[in-house]
Image (spheres, grey):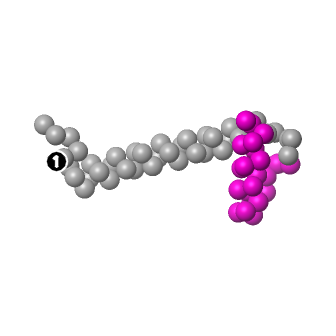
């Protein structure tokens, strides 16, 4: 699974023109870095969505 994800993220790096470690070198840390980035982005997106809903619909976000 680590090798598949490392190849997937290397492909993304190649498409975007970003350098990445060569295959077989630091695969686990490379994948964990991307998993951390995606997790942080997901948490930030969820928080932003919650805040937007709370600001736009203040009375319907928390019914009493």
Q: Residue at left 72%, top 49%? A: 8
Image coordinates of residue 13 in percent, x first then y, are 73, 57
For residue 29, say whether it is visible. no
Q: Residue at left 70%, top 63%? A: 16
Image coordinates of residue 28 in percent, x first then y, are 76, 36
- Considering the numbered disc 1 on the image, is that residue within a helix, a strand or a loop? helix
Which span of residues is magenta-colored? 1-22
Which residue in the structure is indicated by mark 1? 59
Image coordinates of residue 42 in percent, x first then y, are 50, 45
Image coordinates of residue 48 in percent, x first then y, are 39, 50
Question: What is the quadrant of residue 30 in the picture?
Answer: top right
User: Who is closer to the viewer here, 52 or 2?
Assistant: 2
Relative placement, left or right, of 3 versus 39 is right
Quarter occupied by the C terminus: top left
Decide whether residue 36 is among the magenta residues: no
Residue furthest out toward the left: 64
Count the numbered circles shown. 1
Relative placement, left or right, of 15 versus 51 is right
Q: Magenta part mainly helix, strand or loop?
A: helix
For residue 41, say whether it is visible. yes
Q: Residue at left 71%, top 56%? A: 12
Q: Residue at left 29%, top 51%? A: 53
User: Who is closer to the viewer here, 6 or 57?
Assistant: 6
Quarter occupied by the N terminus: top right
Characterize the local packing of mark 1: few (<14), some (14-19) or many (20 or more) Cα atoms within 10 angstroms: few
């Amino acid at each position: 699974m680590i090798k598949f994800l490392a190849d997937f993220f290397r492909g993304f790096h190649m498409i975007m023109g970003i350098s990445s470690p060569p295959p077989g070198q630091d695969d686990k840390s490379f994948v964990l870095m991307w998993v951390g980035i995606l997790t942080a982005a997901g948490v930030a997106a969820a928080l932003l969505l919650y805040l937007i809903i709370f600001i736009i619909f203040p009375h319907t976000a928390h019914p009493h």
